[in-house]
Image (tube, rainbow, N blue to C red):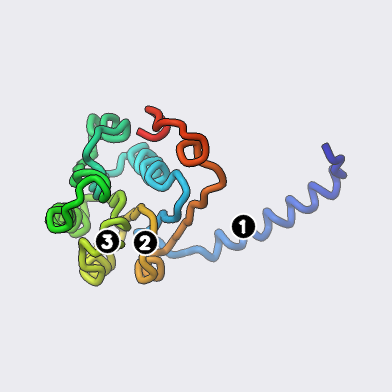
C-alpha cells in the first residue's frame, strides 16, 4: 500500500469538505426528483427498489408499476407487497421475445400506464417506481409525449423513478438525475450461470 503523508491527506480532505459544504449551501431547491436508471448493465431495478426501501424507511407512501415483467414471481414483489404504504402492480406478461404478440403487448402496456398515470396524479404518493418503462417506450407500446407530459405534471414533491435499457433521449433530458449502468462482466452472458434467487429473481 502506498504511504500517504497524513498532513497532506488532512489538507486535501479539508479542502474537499469546504467545497462540499459550499455546494450543499447553494442547493436550496426542494422538489420531487425524476430519476432515470438505464444502460445495459445489471442493477437498474435493484437500485430503484433500494430507493423504494429508503423512502419506506422515512414513512413515505410509494407505488410500483412493473412493465414487461410478470411471467414469473420475483423476490422484490414478494417482499414489498406485504409492507404497509405500498401499492404494487405487476402489469407485464413477460419478456418481449416470449410474448411475441405486439398488439397484446401494446394493450398490456397501456393498461399499465393507466395505473401509473393515476399514481402520478395523486399527491398522496411520495414516490412512484415505473420499472422497465423504458422497454415499453423503446418498442413503441406507449406514446412517448403522453408519458413525458404525465411525468412533467405530477405533484411538485413527488419523486418518480424510471428503469430499463434504452431510455429515450427526451426522457433523459427531462430527468433530474440519470444513471447509466454499464456491463463489465456478467455471470449469465459470460459464464452461462443461471439466474439466482436473491440476485436476479
- Residue 135 coordinates in the image, percent (x, y): 30, 56
Q: How packed is label 2: few (under 14 Cα within 10 Å), some, or many (20 or more)?
A: few
**129, 170: nearer the viewer:** 170
Q: Nearer the viewer, mark 2 or mark 3?
A: 3
What residue is shown at x 24% (from left), y 72% (from top)? 145
Q: Mark 2 vs mark 3: which is more N-terminal? A: 2
**109, 120: nearer the viewer:** 109
**Which of the 4 image quarters holds residue 21?**
bottom right
Is 155 rendered above or below residue 132?
below
Q: Secondary structure at mark 3?
A: loop
Mark carried by residue 21:
1
Q: Secondary structure at mark 1?
A: helix
What residue is shown at x 45% (from left), y 44% (from top)? 42
Image quadrant for the C terminus? top left
Is 140 rendered above or below residue 187?
below
Image quadrant for the N terminus? top right
The CA distance from mark 3 to mark 1 is 44 Å
Read off the residue under disc 3: 139
In the rendered image, the residue lying farthest to the top is 197
The CA distance from mark 2 to mark 3 is 31 Å
- Residue 73 coordinates in the image, percent (x, y): 25, 32
- Residue 161 coordinates in the image, percent (x, y): 34, 53
Read off the residue under disc 2: 31
**Which of the 4 image quarters holds residue 22?**
bottom right
Q: Nearer the viewer, mark 3 or mark 1?
A: 3
| Mark 2 and mark 3 residues within 8 Å of each other at the beta carbon | no
**Which of the 4 image quarters holds residue 47?**
top left
The CA distance from mark 2 to mark 1 is 20 Å
Q: Is residue 127 visible?
A: no
**155, 117: nearer the viewer:** 117
- Residue 173 coordinates in the image, percent (x, y): 40, 70
Amino acid at each position: 500500500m502506498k504511504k500517504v503523508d497524513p498532513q497532506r491527506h488532512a489538507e486535501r480532505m479539508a479542502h474537499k469538505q469546504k467545497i462540499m459544504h459550499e455546494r450543499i449551501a447553494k442547493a436550496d431547491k426542494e422538489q420531487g426528483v425524476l430519476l432515470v436508471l438505464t444502460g445495459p448493465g445489471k442493477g437498474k431495478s435493484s437500485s430503484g427498489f433500494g430507493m423504494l426501501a429508503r423512502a419506506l424507511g422515512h414513512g413515505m407512501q410509494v407505488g410500483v408499476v412493473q412493465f414487461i415483467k410478470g411471467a414469473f414471481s420475483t423476490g422484490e414483489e414478494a417482499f414489498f407487497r406485504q409492507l404497509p404504504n405500498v401499492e404494487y402492480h405487476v402489469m407485464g406478461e413477460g419478456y418481449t421475445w416470449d410474448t411475441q404478440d405486439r398488439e397484446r403487448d401494446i394493450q398490456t402496456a397501456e393498461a399499465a400506464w393507466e395505473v401509473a398515470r393515476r399514481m402520478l396524479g395523486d399527491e398522496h404518493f411520495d414516490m412512484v417506481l415505473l420499472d422497465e418503462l423504458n422497454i415499453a417506450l423503446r418498442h413503441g407500446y406507449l406514446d412517448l409525449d403522453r408519458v413525458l407530459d404525465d411525468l412533467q405534471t405530477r405533484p411538485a414533491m413527488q419523486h418518480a423513478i424510471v428503469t430499463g435499457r434504452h431510455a429515450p433521449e427526451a426522457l433523459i433530458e427531462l430527468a433530474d438525475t440519470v444513471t447509466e449502468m454499464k456491463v463489465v462482466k456478467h455471470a449469465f452472458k459470460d459464464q452461462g450461470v443461471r439466474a439466482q434467487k436473491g440476485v436476479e429473481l
